């Protein structure tokens, strides 16, 4: 537990400082996350690491992040390359290739929106991080205290409906208060009513999706990079879905 707390404090410090400073520091942190997250996923798929698949996945993620005007080009080229590999390499079955493609899109667009939102307003970036973090924390503690009915035993045996509802409620309320403190970042209030209601739900779905991925590949954690926490993707699971939907909402409300 001590190790987990120390690791968590370090992660929180890196997150807060890079989110506040932005610029090259945030870009460096997110680039590392994209590259190492891609490595973690390619690594868990099978014992023999496929460097070609990793290179394609990593380059596509970086293309989406930094050359977003050409994101569609990178995504479509990755699709062609990965499917070609699956055709000629019997060790790369279609389901693994499909999962790799989906994971690339999730990681790449999540990193892009993190950069994009922070550049618009660092406090608004804090808003979306608070949603996913507090939803996860309160879902855990409410679930321990009041949880009786299982949410989805096939994917995550320990999660409960009560915990999920508690996480949604506290994530919704605290994020809306944060947005109100900063005058809704100069945007209409209704946008953050919608966001605060929807994002905690998507955050919890993201957590379940990454649990499903780990169960599919028979692993407990994506890696052991972070003592007591697992890997990069273990810490980003709920953040990824949350940040993507928030980016989509900002695009729709623009």
Image (tube, rainbow, N blue to C red):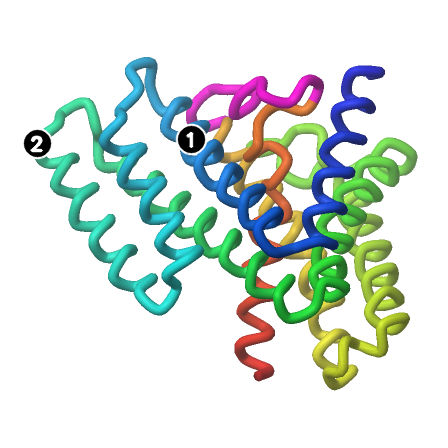
Q: Is 115 or 253 nearer to us in this picture? A: 115
* Image coords of residue 184 (percent x, y): 80, 76
- What is the spatial separation of the Cα atoms under label 2 and label 1, in whole angstroms? 21 Å
Q: What residue is rendered at 25% in x and 61% in y?
A: 73
Q: Give the percent coordinates (x, y) of residue 176.
A: 83, 67
Q: Quadrant of the N terminus?
A: top right
Considering only vertical position in the picture, is 230 above or below 239? Answer: above
Q: Is residue 18 above or below residue 50?
A: below
Quadrant in which residue 202 is drawn: bottom right
- Side (left or right) of 106 relative to 24: left
- Mark 1 residue crowding within 10 angstroms, few (<14) / some (14–19) / many (20+): many
In this view, the residue in front, 162 or 53, is 53
Bin the neighbour count of mark 2 within 10 Å (Cα to Cα): few under 14, some 14-19, many 20 and up: few
Give the SS element for disc 2: helix
Instruction: Please name the predominant secondary structure of the magenta segment in the image.
Output: loop
Question: Which residues lie in the magenta part?
Answer: 215-228
Residue 102 x %, y %? 37, 47
Q: Which residue is the site of mark 2?
A: 88
Q: What residue do we see at 64% from left, 62% from top?
A: 118
Instruction: Tell me the element at label 1.
Output: helix
Q: Is residue 44 magenta?
A: no
- Marks 2 and 1: CB-CB under 8 Å? no
Question: Which residue position is annotated with label 1?
Answer: 41
Q: Residue at x 31, y 33 (%)?
A: 54
Query: What count of labels does the image hold?
Result: 2
Which residue occupies the foreground of this view, 83 or 158?
83
Vertical placement of residue 90 versus 125, above or below: above
Residue 227 drawn in magenta = yes
């Amino acid at each position: 537990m001590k190790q987990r707390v120390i690791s968590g404090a370090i992660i929180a410090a890196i997150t807060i400082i890079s989110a506040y400073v932005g610029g090259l520091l945030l870009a460096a942190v997110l680039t590392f996350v994209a590259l190492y997250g891609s490595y973690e996923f390619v690594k868990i798929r099978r014992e023999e690491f496929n460097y070609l698949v990793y290179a394609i996945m990593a380059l596509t993620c970086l293309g989406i992040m930094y050359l977003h005007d050409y994101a569609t080009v990178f995504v479509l080229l990755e699709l062609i390359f990965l499917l070609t590999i699956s055709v000629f390499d019997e060790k790369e079955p279609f389901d693994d290739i499909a999962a790799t493609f989906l994971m690339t899109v999730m990681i790449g667009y999540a990193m892009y929106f993190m950069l994009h939102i922070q550049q618009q307003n660092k406090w608004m970036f804090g808003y979306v991080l608070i949603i996913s973090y507090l939803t996860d924390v309160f879902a855990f503690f409410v679930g321990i205290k009041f949880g009786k009915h299982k949410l989805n035993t096939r994917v995550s045996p320990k999660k409960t409906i009560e915990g999920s509802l508690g996480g949604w409620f506290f994530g919704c309320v605290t994020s809306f208060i944060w947005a109100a403190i900063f005058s809704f970042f100069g945007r209409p209030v209704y946008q953050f009513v919608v966001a605060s209601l929807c994002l905690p739900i998507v955050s919890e779905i993201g957590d379940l999706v990454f649990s499903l991925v780990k169960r599919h590949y028979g692993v407990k954690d994506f890696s052991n990079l972070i003592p007591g926490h697992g890997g990069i993707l273990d810490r980003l699971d709920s953040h990824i879905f949350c940040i993507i939907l928030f980016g989509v909402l900002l695009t729709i409300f623009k």
